[in-house]
Amino acid sequence: MELPAGGDLPAEATHRLFHREAFRKPPREFAPEAFSPDWFAMVEDDRYRRQGYWLPRSLEFTKHAGETVLTLGEGLGTDWVQYAKNGAEVITVCPSHEQLGVIRANFEQRGLPAKFLHSSPDSLPIVDDSVDVACLFGLIGDVDDPAGVVAEMYRVLRPGGKVIAVVAAQYNAEFWKHSCFPWRKWFGKPSGAGGPGHTGAGLKGLFGGFVEHKLSKRHLRRGELPPVWRWVPLPLLERAMGNLLILKAFKPLTAAAARKAA
């Protein structure tokens, strides 16, 4: 979704943005002006207190002080702000001028520095081997050339640099509900079979040029589960049927020698 210049959005649109980023609808009793410091602060507080409790650890907000972190993906830049708060040098790339403006506002209202680049993710205006960490959230499912985006991330990462990718998982809670309770379709329940998400094997294949792949699943609400499953600890269920798949991997150290030989 592209945002009009200056953040001049209808109330319904700002509510959708808030809901998507904070994992809940904006409260009726206190509704700060959209894109104000209080609005961004409320989004951040809700994002990490609720279904996104796992994000700070999985995206390693506190581990990359002094490093250059490239950020790609959807949203208001809430996660990218956390890297800057913890001392990373953030480069944010976005193909939408409007969305990039909102991300810039999020940084500026907190007094945090970053570099904001308007560019297609499969043609990054960044020199080779210049980034320590590349973090991608979503996006892969929305572009025409996912392999091209991954190739660009590989190109700009230093040998030994780390990629963190968060994408929709195919084998999520809806998929397993359909598989374990096929009679749900008799009652008009939605089917999770054949969803648009990624499998672990497919994601590792897409990032095949990287090494030391590590996969995990996160992001699940108890309301998405049948009552018979809700007694199981949520972190355990997330690992089996979370809605998001997280991949971490490294650009091989041998990439520098290969580039010189080429």
Image: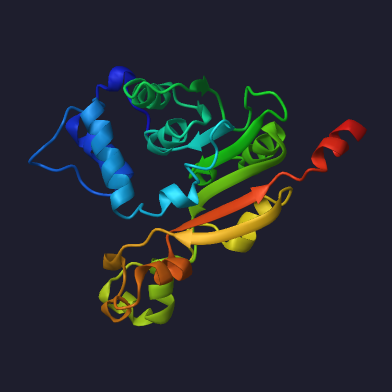
Q: Farthest residue in the left direction?
A: 29
In the rendered view, would you say 191 is above or below 102?
A: below
User: In the rendered view, does 147 fall on the left or right side of 41?
Assistant: right
Image coordinates of residue 238 in percent, x first then y, are 42, 66
Residue depicted at x 30% and y 70%: 189
User: In the rendered view, does 51 fall on the left or right side of 125?
Assistant: left
Q: From the image, which quarter does the C terminus lie in?
A: top right
Residue 192 visible in the displayed image: no
Residue depicted at x 42% and y 71%: 236
Say which of 143 and 245 sits in front. 245
Say which of 1 and 38 sits in front. 38
Say which of 119 and 239 sits in front. 239
User: In the rendered view, does 41 fall on the left or right side of 261?
Assistant: left
Give the quadrant of residue 172.
Answer: bottom left
In the rendered view, would you say 40 is above or below 210?
A: above
Residue depicted at x 13% and y 35%: 31
Residue depicted at x 25% and y 26%: 37
Image coordinates of residue 71 in percent, x first then y, are 52, 34
Which color scheme is applied? rainbow
Q: Farthest residue in the top direction?
A: 6
Residue 97 visible in the displayed image: yes
Image coordinates of residue 81 in percent, x first then y, are 41, 32
Q: From the image, which quarter does the N terminus lie in?
A: top left
Image coordinates of residue 24 in percent, x first then y, are 24, 49
Give the quadrant of residue 203.
Answer: bottom right
Count of picture labels: 0
